[in-house]
Amino acid sequence: NITRAVMSCGQFRNSKAASSPAENYHLARRRTLQVAVSALLTECGFESAEKAAVETLTEMMQSYITEIGRCAKAYCEHTARSIPTLPDTVVALIEMGFNVDTLPVYAKRSQRMVITAPPVTNSPVTPKALSAGQKRTHPAHIPSHFPEFPDPHTYIKTPIEPVHNPFLRDVERALTRFMAKTGETQSLFKDDITAFPLIAARPSTIPYLSALLPSELELQTLEETDSSEQDDQTDSENTTGNIINDDPGADKENSMLPPSGGVPSTKASEDNVIDNPYLRPVKKPKVRRKK
Amino acid sequence: MNRKKDKGFESPRPFKLTHQVVCINNINFQRKSVIGYVELTIFPTVVNLNRIKLNSKQCRIYRVRVNELEAPFIYNDPTLEVCHHESKQRNLNYFSSAYTAAVSAVDPDAGHGELVIKVPSELWKQGDDLKVLKVYIEFSLDQPKGGLHFVVPDVEGSMAERGAHVFSFGYQNSTRFWFPCVDSYSELCTWKLEFTVDASMVAVSCGDLVETIYTHDMRKKTFHYVLPIPTAAPNISLAVGPFEILVDPYMHEVTHFCLPQLLPLLKHSMSYLHEIFEFYEEILTCRYPYSCFKTVFVDEAYVQVSSYASMSIFSTNLLHSAMIIDQTPQTRRCLAQALAQQFFGCFISRMSWADEWVLKGISGYIYGLYLKKTFGVNEYRHWIKGELDKIVDYELKMGGVLLHPTFSGGKEKDNPTPHLHFSIKHPHTLSWEYYKMFQCKAHLVMRLIENRISMEFMLQVFNKLLSLASTASSQKYQSHMWSQMLLSTHAFLKSISNVSGKDIGPLIKQWVDQSGVVKFFGSFAFNRKRNVLELEIRQDYTSSGTQKYVGPIKVTVQELDGSFNHTLQIEENSLKHDIPCHSKSRRNKKKKIPLMNGEEVDMDLSAMDADSPLLWIRIDPDMSILRKVEFEQADFMWQYQLRYERDVVAQEEAISALEKFPTPASRLALTDILEQEQCFYKVRMQACFCLARIANAMVSTWQGPPAMKSLFTRMFCCKSCPNIVKTNNFINFQSYFLQKTMPVAMALLRDVQNLCPKDVLNFILDLIKYNDNRKNKFSDNYYRAELIEALTNSLTPAISINNEVRTVDNLNADVRLILEEITRFLNMEKLLPSFRNTITVSCLRAIRQLQKNGHIPSDPSLFKSYAQYGHFVDVRIAALEALVDYTRVERSATELQWLLVMVQNDPAHYVRHKILGMLCKNPPFTKTTDSALCNEALVDQLWKLMNSGTSHDWRLRCDAVNLYYTLFGLTRPSCLPLPELGLVLNLKEKKAVLNPTIKPELGVRIFTCPHSTQLRPAPPFNTMEDEDIDMETVHDSQAFIHHHLNLLERPSTPGKYSLQLWLFSGKEPPSVEQTMLTMPSTPAPSFSKETTSLSSKHSSEHSHHHHHHHHEHKKKKKKHKHKHKHKHKHESKDKEKERERDNSHVYSNSPASGRSLRSPSLSD
């Protein structure tokens, strides 16, 4: 235990040099814990303690608290919840051999020392999950205060990383053969229809889309080879009424009309608006037109 | 149609249109129908305007009101069925003249129209003060076959979600297909256009969008457009769809529209449009004439580009992403063409069809200037050479293309283009190919004018025309200035002479008023004693499509001392021209040789003739004559020309000439050019193919590796492992194009057994195997497609033993490898489709080639499945091309039928047009060959197709005519039985004789004797009122037939039966005034005067759909002084009409159908 405490001390000292917000937070917590240990020692009648001893006790205390938390969390998750409740903690304490009934008395003891709150309170900023792709905007029937859609890759499709594969051609051939075997095929020979199976040609309803839009793979290649060039994601499936105008230089205002087209967007009223008749709001009908 | 000396414009109509409202208040995508109305504001220009002729096709007209008064109308479209369906005539001469007559009968440029409205008599008296009339017409269109095209994908969801859209289209003046109008380019007016569409859709049309208003139920919105610039109806268009909208970031007045999901492509493709705008505005020193511009990209477009007032409609297939190389210049060209036509064609319109060449010429010319600026002088000269070659080849093959036809009186002998199987009197009778060549020639002639008067003056002329038009456009109608916006040949030439002070009369006479190109043959000898080059230039001006040239010609001679220009005069009888040389043949070894551009180069002169100082000679190097030159000079001269002449045209000429000289020296010259990076890439590409041919010719003596292989390896393969190609990097476009082309050319190499060398095939297979595009910024789809083409080129006919059936087992090992690749490519394309499915296209071609060469069984089923509607259009065309080829090779009646059915039923107009075009290019049989496919049923089917099946699409009808001509020729198809009996009616001598010699092949007016039902009574008419309409005014041909029937009354052979009369025009000298006439085999019956007049009347009613326009009829009329005299002048006719009207005319006021009751379509 002592060696562990020393080691942890060493780590502690080492990490002092670093000063990321998360580490600062840990430092502050540790210091608070140390104060608590010292207070307990004072309570017990110690007048002084070696630094190493305090450190060791702090380490033990931290381990104990961590274990309570871990254990409580495990119980909580065991019952398919995500946030531990008081009973979870109680069960954890019992499991660790602690007599819970003594706790209220101990808590209300007279010689208890009060420690000031730790100076640093801001919790560490969890780094944002890397967002990939463009999140979908809410369709008209979902109110805007509802949570945003998650990244498209989590529930639509995950972009694939082209892997350099020396056997790519073999893979391709195997894949196409598989496709050909599982689906309808056409054949060039009458005697052996399995010889050069061709996946059957199937007409599509909107043939120009697949013929004109670059494939996902190609788009990715483009992004990799030229990251400076901003290109648009093609999977931004705009609702048909959407009106979007180009904005390469950022000096022009992008204005967007909602799909329903009824209300001009707030943006449009800003300066530098492009005056184009197709971006103007649609007028309400006049109340009375000659009948 | 003549070039008038006065520049004023005379309207053929007794009124002037000033304003038109088009309101389409319902567009139903489900039913594909449209409902709306138009209101035309017209000023009568004669007193007592009593009838108004408008154009309208396929519209159902519900009511017509003139100034709030219900007005009777008749609707008669003679082009629906050109020759009456009961006619047994099947010769094309007959059809062509009937078709021309039908088109003339409703030609707005002659003041005619399909819709004749009678002005209510209450309004006649207004005539004196010539008050404004407002003509209001309610109409609808149900499943239009032409004019408007609906694209409605068959998927789930609302119309907007499905990407359903509709747009107007057509060839030349085709606006009458979707709303009633004066469908002429010379009738200008201002416009108000309103379109009510679903709220999720956008309606894009001409002019300024003033406002968009919701309907009361908020489910629809109405787009209000105003076009204050006087515009002709054919320049009005509409596109409605759930378009994504992109405001041009550089020019906010410009808005782009594309179909859903294509916005990223639209952004990229439109990112350079502003440069084109800037270019045109700068050279023309004139603002873009309209206040806004819209581009709309639609699916299933009729043509790639069509321009209308302030908007252009493009094919959506022009859109591309930044990864695509090959499509980029093509799309830019299309945009530049569209914009050029905005100035000349839309804003400035033509005065008459005969002036079309000026507008097409100017727009093509300024487009050429754009090409020169954007793509460089080399590209421009290459393009000009290509265009010149195209027109020369076409004219030499098909006969002359006449830019400015003049028609005097419509007489047969004055037909300016007797060599053609169609009339060039109307745009709607022209073959599409001819029209394309016409446009090509027009811009080349503009360039000739530029050569003559300088570009500066040329641009000044354009600026002048535009400023005149621009001033006129802002004026009110009352100022009578609008005709300034119409351009005629005369006004154009006058402007040129005013600006430049030069007389370009001879040039115009040579190239514009006359058809044909010049064919030169040149050869030379060097006279050492006199130090003179004796040049001989001969001409062939007797072959079809040629003309004689007299005038200056430039000859450039490259000598040791430099390059010298000489201007020779081509005269009637002088063939030889002596050109003194500057250099002595003794050459100074050390001296550099100065070139035309001032550059001085070292040359290895060892190849040349020691006695002659001549390096090479060029005839007409600037292409300032529309000519073909066949020039003879020694091989080393061509080689010098290729290596050292800096003009790309000269280099290309040298390459073509070197094909005839398969020598190591030619090989070296070509290889050197291939390697020279400064050399224009298209020249290098051409050199590849020439090198392949030379290598094949030299196969027995060829040394070293196959041609181009080591070069390709050096340029594109890894240093360490020469059979592996480097990772693709197409950043240098010149080498990209070369990398694409070289394998294709290499695959054409053949060894002594006439097979593709094994190492070439393996090399290409390796290129495919090691192709790696992962690090490339650009897509490699075109490159891979070319590699497949290379595989295709490597194929040679299979060695067939006893015509055995092709099976997998007896597949050649090399072919097996090729087939393996093609299968993999084609299957991968299903998973990862390439841009425009170029891979599939190449694979289909390869498979057809494998079939044709007997490696795999010849089978059309695969192509049929790819040809179906629902595949990308390029794929369909490739599959159809294979099917057309299959049809010819296998003489398959089934496939021919299958194709013809598709011509009639396919939803995509472009595909129908292409099928007929491909059948003409690769016909299953021709008029000179015999084939089992040629039978009566096919004749009838094609006849029906061109006669009535294609009335909704001018272009398609002309395509059908072309095919008929290709298959059967001008006269009676040879597979039809000979006519049994015929009667010759000699109109001159008023005698009917039994046909002495039936020689159908001569194109004599022959008459197949029809069955006896010919003598049927006049068809019953439900409404007798209808019958009494003055038919003369309906259209010319009727009057004409009527007239001839009356002629028949006069001869002394009266009878009691009505005679059905067929009149047609042939090409014989006019003295043979014979017309054959059907007769029952009974002796000639006698007429009684009374019955004849009655029956002839019926007959005329009945046969008024025949519209045979006899070119002689005018002459005849004068002789016989018939009261139904038909003249083109209105004044003389009006009185007559008045008289007739008094006793006979009650107009049909039936609101039921827009079609005339006698419309042939109902009788079908």
Image (spheres, rainbow, N blue to C red):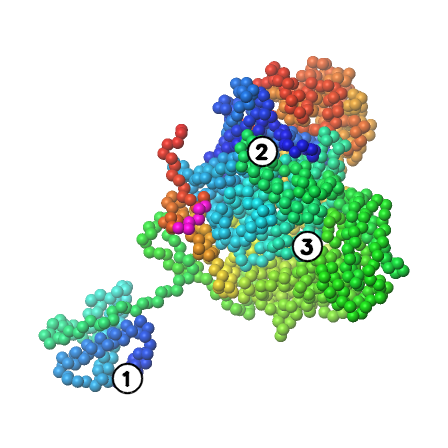
SS assignment at label 2: loop
Which residue is denoted by mark 1 in the rendering? A6
Check the image and report above or below for B431 versus B671. above
In the image, residue B342 sits, relative to residue B129, either above or below, namely: below
Q: In the image, B306: left or right of B887?
A: left
Q: Are marks 1 and 2 on the same chain?
A: no
- Closest to the observer, B746 or B971: B746
Q: Amino acid at mark 2?
A: Met
Q: Which mark is residue B481?
A: 2
Q: CA distance from mark 1 to mark 2?
A: 102 Å
Position of B225 relative to A91 (above/below): above
Q: Could you tell me which residue is drawn at 58 percent across and 47 percent down?
A: B285
**Chain part drawn in magenta:** A271-276
Given contact means CB atoms under 8 Å apart, are the residues at marks 1 and 2 in contact?
Answer: no
Q: Earlier in the sequence, mark 3 or mark 2?
A: 3
Camera-side residue of B636 and B697? B636
Residue in the image at 25% along x and 74% along y: A29
Q: Secondary structure at mark 1?
A: helix
Taking the magenta stretch, the answer to whether it contains residue B223 is no
Residue B146: in sight, yes or no?
Answer: no
Query: Is A274 in the magenta?
Result: yes
Mark 3 and mark 2 residues within 8 Å of each other at the beta carbon? no
- Name the residue tied to disc 3: B382
- Other residues around mark 3 within 10 Å, as few (<14) / some (14–19) / many (≥20): some
Q: Amino acid at mark 1?
A: Val
Residue B534 appears in which quarter of the rendering?
bottom right
Tell me where residue B1094 appears, x and y as whole percent: 67, 16
